[in-house]
Amino acid sequence: MSETASAAPLNTGNSYGSFGYRTYVLLTLTVVYTFNFIDRILIGVVGRPIIDEFGLSNFQFGILSGLGFALFYTLLGIPIATMSERMNRTRIIGVCVILWSIATVLCGFTVGFITLLLARLAVGVGEAGCTPPANSLISDYYKKSARPTALGIYAMGVTAGGVLAQLGGGYLIENFTWRESFMIVGAPGVLIGLVVLLTIKEPPRGYSDAPGTKAPEKAGFKEAMAEIKASRTFWVMTIGATIAAFSGYAMTGLVSLYIQYEFSLSPGIAAIYYMAPIAVAGTVGAFLGGYLTELANKKSKTAASWVPGIAFLLCVVPFSFGFITPTISLMLIGLMGGTLLQYFYLGAQYNIAQSVVSLRSRATSIAVLLFVVNLIGYGAGPPTLGYVADYFSNQFIADGAFAGQLTVSCSLTDPELSSELLAACQEAKAYGVRLACIAGGVLFGFSGIFFILSGRTLVQEQYTQDAPA
């Protein structure tokens, strides 16, 4: 049973529970985090049949994959993190897993844009309750020296979820309907949530900290915001990270659609043979970016700004090449190269955000960074670039032989369209999505400029008062 071991001594300096039990807890939380990402990404894998069935524009689908998820996910992140400081964390996680899993299942029962949007909003509500309490739990289960490895294993849920969403989602959409895919993916989460509630114990807060450890002084929100507002480095970097998220989240869905439209592939084949390798490249890029930044830090105090900055500038070339080459194998090489470079910044954004404020304000600085990045980047990116794709598709239709007979919402499964109209519909969709993706790739270059500019004040603004004298 989940319980709070309130009788146990605080600040023991030891990890909580037996090695086998805390390993079980860590792996269970990692599975939870993996499903967290699978459930949020799945809509992009099965997007095309949804677009065809509901007659959606790319803008509408961008609302579903972006703002529809990100709105409550972002707005509830800070309140749930605050709740995690006072309430039973295993119950928060367990209840939220069940909530978002039921919402994922309900996606399969929707009848149109509005009902699917409501289900996606509910997914965002549930998933907001995953990471803050999970990180807090892991920090109490593992002593300080073991936490980096434990938290690193937990963080693998991001990359594992991304790859498994493409592989598993690709298999499902090849063998089942998109509705059944949501049900099959969402249902196990209900069981996982019950496992969390019934088998994970709530450890005493601070149990694994060294004896006599005092909790760091907490800055009030106004004090923390005053530090953050005063940092030019923080805001310049945040602009760069937001542009990267704006483009990156949008391209996650658009690239899959481009591959399907341009090369006449099914959603499952596109996911398994092309989107999954691209996701793996992103995983390698996140690791490689952190590794190279760590090496460069030995010689340059501003490496956290210019390593990802240069990578962003460089990734424009392979992305552009990938979207203009007519050869599918060369396209894959280009997109994998661009994605690898694109993800160099993931660790650097947190490094910079925390380095320019005092220790007591670091949690707030990360919360503010994620609030801006998720709300603007995740929320606005997919619908905005979706609108760009719609605009160019409409222009293509208006300038072609079938002007007035097609719209951007034309369905490739519409039995009333002739073979000529279906071919024109697919060509128009491919054209619009290609140009939107090229625009997204170019935006990464602007992210690079802002990251490099943040380095101009990084050294002067780095907070040193927390360091021992």
Image (cartoon, rainbow, N blue to C red):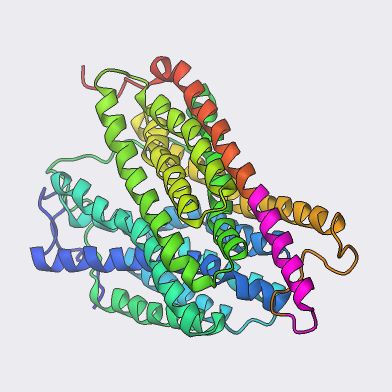
Quarter of the figure with residue 213: top left
Does residue 37 show up magenta in the picture? Answer: no
Number of numbered discs: 0
Compared across the picture, whether 67 is left or right of 195 comes to right
Res. 205 visible in picture: no
Question: Measuring 86% from the left and 62% from the top, which residue is drawn there?
Answer: 401
The residue lying toward the viewer, choosing from 434 and 55, is 434
Q: Assign the C terminus to one quadrant of the image.
A: top left
Most distant residue in the right direction: 404
**Residue 400 percent coordinates (x, y):** 84, 58
**Residue 234 percent coordinates (x, y):** 49, 29
**Magenta region: which residues?**
414-435
Q: Assign the N terminus to one quadrant of the image.
A: bottom left
Q: Is residue 191 above or below residue 305?
A: below
Q: Is residue 330 above or below residue 59?
A: above
Does residue 418 show up magenta in the picture? Answer: yes
**Residue 368 percent coordinates (x, y):** 51, 41
**Residue 78 percent coordinates (x, y):** 49, 51
The residue lying toward the viewer, choosing from 387 and 453, is 387
In terms of secondary structure, what is the magenta stretch mainly? helix
Res. 193 visible in picture: yes
Compared across the picture, whether 332 is left or right of 443 comes to left
Quarter of the figure with residue 141: bottom left
Question: Measuring 63% from the left and 57% from the top, which residue is drawn there?
Answer: 67
Question: Measuring 49% from the left and 45% from the top, which residue is drawn there?
Answer: 370
